[in-house]
Image: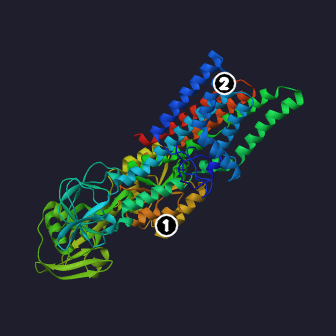
Amino acid sequence: MSKTSSSTDSNSSKLCPSSTCNYNSSHDHNHKHGYEIDMKNFLIQTSISFILLLLGLFFNFYLKYDLYASICYLMVLVISGREIFIEGIKSLLFRKRFYIEFLVAVASIGALLIGEFAEGSTVVFLFSIANFLESYASGRAEKSIEALLREKPVKARIIRNGIEVEVDVEEAKVGDTIIIKPGEKIPLDGIVIEGNSTVNEAPLTGESIPVEKKPGDKVYSGTINLNGVLKVKVEKEAKDTLFSRIIELVKKARKDKSEIERFIEKFSQYYTPTILLISLLISIIPPFLFGSSLRYWVYRSLTLLVISCPCALAISTPVAIVSGLTNAAKNGVLIKGGKHLEHITKVNILAFDKTGTLTKGQLKVTKIIPLNEKSEKEILEIASSIGKYSNHPIDKAILREAEKRGVKQFPVNDFRAFPGKGIAAKVNGELHIIGNEEILSDFNIEVPLEIINKLREEGITAIAIADRSKVIGIIGVEDEIREESIHVIQQLKERGIRIIMITGDNEVTAKNIAKKLGINEFRANLLPEDKIKVINELMDKHNNHVIMVGDGINDAPALANACVGIAMGTGTEIAIESGDIVLMKPSLNKIPYIMDLSRKTMKIVKGNVIASIGIKAAIALLAILGLVGLWVAVAIGDMGLSFMVIINALRLAAEKY
């Protein structure tokens, strides 16, 4: 197989040096080695080696033509072992380290020196197959990035001087107008300025239901325009689009190692020299002390050397982690490193921000109480007529309710705003006031405290509507709870997670929202800096194992301080920056999925590590006792075990939740 010239960036290769055995790792910047995945060349090479090996065995054991057999065995060594021998020599002479190729080269040459030609060639042949399997696994993991890159648009249709021009996306500038026709990928982030359509945002959010787009709506690079022509004003250059940033973050995530990966790297610093020393002692001490056969104990030491090659151990963890990250990316969840998958499995405390996370962050009218012979319709007509001149969230909620009910609005004059209190204006020539108790007191209007306090006890914010002399109605508004919140909280509780809600709302409102959601613990009246204190407090009490879920805006500091910060949003800048995990669609449904994915990933990682160490140790013991030979050591202890852990790890990428 041909060699690559790529190198990567960790020390895990001390344990398993070829790129086939250490996905996303390297020895140093000058260490260029490994095996390029080339299925055609591999099949040709392996087929020839296999035929030669069979011929050698036939000549050796059936016809007793030892010379012809030896020639066949040597040809297998040259064809299948060329790269192995070259890398083994380089590792010792130029890099002053003992890599796995060196171990195999020593074992095969040692077998030749003691006359075990069949065993020596079999070791190299089987090891080359194991190498390919691991290289293939690494390639499969690498395809998670390639798949994202294939989704990245490369062309954009821009209007310049009234003419449509197709250019590379890198040539488009902020402020350009682009046209996207039905079935085309949206090439750049921007705002729709003309046209209506539905857009498939699954490449970003994992959500298959198309999203309606109209003028004023945002669209994102990499999503697919389905049925209408859209004109979009470009807001981000190609390198700054949400899609490009996701690709970069996924690339970085592969380098952000979990604790178990770091342990294996540290373990690798001592492993190979120790195995070499033990093998050397096994070949020398018994013949020296007991007069045993030198050839017999050299053979045992060579078998131990081969069985101790830790390919399976080195490849199992990074392939499983990348498979988990890939699965998450397919489901609209951006996880910024394997360590976060590992941390989640240790967490049993989850703190939810309320506004914009458990709730939609948008007020909704839930009560209209007419007083003094007025109707609901009249109350809404007056409130919306005045409220259309205000930008306050409560007035916007009233306008939405008026639009929903189709009520008419009246001419308004003499509009006045009273910050922190309310607004007032003349409707059809008559003064009306909208606001809290304070503005009513300023106008000497009696406050219906019994009604207002009752609404507050239910967690509803009460707004009074009055004429010049009396209150004519009360409108109750509250932050709308997300449809999925109650179900998600129940799912998390079933998984043994303790839930705490943190909010800037007052105690009464927080208590009522928590009750509706089925949350037993909450902290209210919190400023952003108070949220950080709460998170730090929880971290101290629970060994730093706390997850914070927020909308990524005012929650950014708390998200950053938590063990794992999960940011909601459709790709807001602050969410991507502040969260360790970003939910590309603002839905809580993905949180139980993240819990399950992390547990499944780490279960596979730990299972692979235990299997790799346990099976290797058992076969190594059998090798020392002389109960297994070289070819068994490679076929079962190296190739077979590597294949098993690879298949176990790769299934994560395709698993559905």
- SS of the residue under disc 2: helix
Residue 67 x %, y %:
66, 24
Going from N to C along the chain, the mark reached first, 1 or 2, is 2
The reply to whether residue 270 is in sight is yes
How many residues crowd around disc 2 within 10 Å: few (fewer than 14), some, or many (20 or more)? few
Residue 21 x %, y %:
58, 44
Residue 310's quadrant in the figure?
Answer: top right
User: Which residue is farthest bottom?
Assistant: 414
Q: Is residue 434 left or right of residue 81?
A: left
Residue at point 22%, 79% (across, down): 424
Residue 120's quadrant in the figure?
Answer: top right
Q: Is residue 241 left or right of residue 124?
A: left
Q: Amino acid at mark 1?
A: Pro
Residue at point 75%, 26% (across, down): 625
Q: Nearer the viewer, residue 283 or 41?
A: 41
Residue 176 versus residue 320 in the image, above or below: below
**Mark drawn on residue 557:** 1
Q: Is residue 50 left or right of residue 379?
A: right
Residue 374 versus residue 107 in the image, above or below: below
Q: Quick one: quadrant of the C terminus?
A: top left
Residue 216's quadrant in the figure?
Answer: bottom left
Q: Amino acid at mark 2?
A: Leu
Q: Nearer the viewer, residue 55 or 406?
A: 55
Name the residue that disc number 2 marks. Answer: 67
How many residues crowd around disc 1 within 10 Å: few (fewer than 14), some, or many (20 or more)? some
Q: CA distance from mark 1 to mark 2?
A: 75 Å
**Mark drawn on residue 652:** none
Which mark is in front, 1 or 2? Answer: 2
- SS of the residue under disc 1: helix
Residue 608 x %, y %:
57, 38
